[in-house]
Image: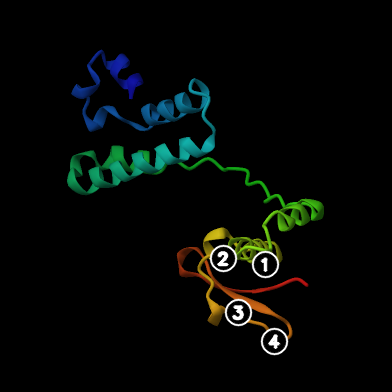
Amino acid sequence: MRDASGRLKRDPYRLEVRDLDRDVVLGVLEHIERERGNGPRPRKARLTAIRSFFRHVAVSDPGALAVAQRVLDIPAKRMVLRAPRHLSTPAVEALLTAPDPHTSRGRRDYALLLLLARTGARVSEAIGVDAADLHLDRPPQVHLRGKGRKRACAPTRA
C-alpha cells in the first residue's frame, strides 16, 4: 500500500478504502514478487488476505462496493505444480535397513517405514492407522484417513 501512500502524499494510516483500488493492490502484489523476490505462493497468500479484507468491506461499507468488487476480481496467478519425487529402490532399501530389528522401537520404525514405502501414504495418514484399518487378505490393503476427512484404500505392494 506504499504506492497509494506515496502517490497521494499521505501517511499509510490515513488512507481510505477508496484509495486502495485495483491498480494499487496489483502494484503491491508485483512488489512482493519483483522487489522482495518471493514466488507465487506468498503472492497468492497475500491476495487471499486482501480479498478477505475487501469481502468484509463490501458487506460493511456499501459506498466502497465498486472498489471492493474490482479488487475481488483480481485473478490468482497460476502456479506450476511439480510432480512429487519418489525415492529410488536403493534409497528405500537403505531406509529399511536403518532401524535396529532387535529393539521394539526399531521394529516399530521398520513397520512404519515399510508402510510408508509400500502404500505411498503421508506420515499423518500412516500414524492414524490402527489394526482395524489393516486388511491382510489377498490383495492386502490399508484403509487410510487423509486430509479433510478423506478416506482411501491403499493397496500394498509386495
Q: Is residue 124 left or right of residue 94?
A: left
Q: Is residue 119 left or right of residue 30?
A: right
Query: Measuring 67% from the left and 57% from the top, which residue is drawn there?
Result: 99
Q: Which label belongs to residue 126?
A: 2
How dense is the environment of label 4, judged by Cα within 10 Å: few (below 14), some, or many (20 and up)?
few
Q: Amino acid at mark 4?
A: Asp
Marks 1/2: CA–CA distance: 9 Å
Mark 1 falls on what kind of element?
Answer: helix
Marks 4/1: CA–CA distance: 16 Å
Marks 4/2: CA–CA distance: 19 Å
Check contact, mark 3 vs mark 1: CB within 8 A. no
Q: Amino acid at mark 1?
A: Thr
Residue 70 appears in the rendering: no
Mark 2 falls on what kind of element?
Answer: helix
Check contact, mark 1 vs mark 2: CB within 8 A. yes
Check contact, mark 4 vs mark 2: CB within 8 A. no
Residue 48 appears in the rendering: yes
Q: Which residue is mark 4?
A: 137
Q: Which residue is mark 1?
A: 119
Q: Amino acid at mark 2?
A: Ala
**Which part of the image, by quadrant, shows the N terminus?**
top left
N-terminal of the two: label 1 or label 2?
1
Query: Measuring 23% from the left and 39% from the top, which residue is drawn there?
Result: 64
N-terminal of the two: label 4 or label 1?
1
Query: Measuring 46% from the left and 27% from the top, which residue is drawn there?
Result: 32
Q: Nearer the viewer, residue 113 or 29?
A: 113
Q: Which label belongs to residue 134?
A: 3
How dense is the environment of label 2, judged by Cα within 10 Å: few (below 14), some, or many (20 and up)?
many
In the rendered image, the residue lying farthest to the bottom is: 137
N-terminal of the two: label 3 or label 1?
1
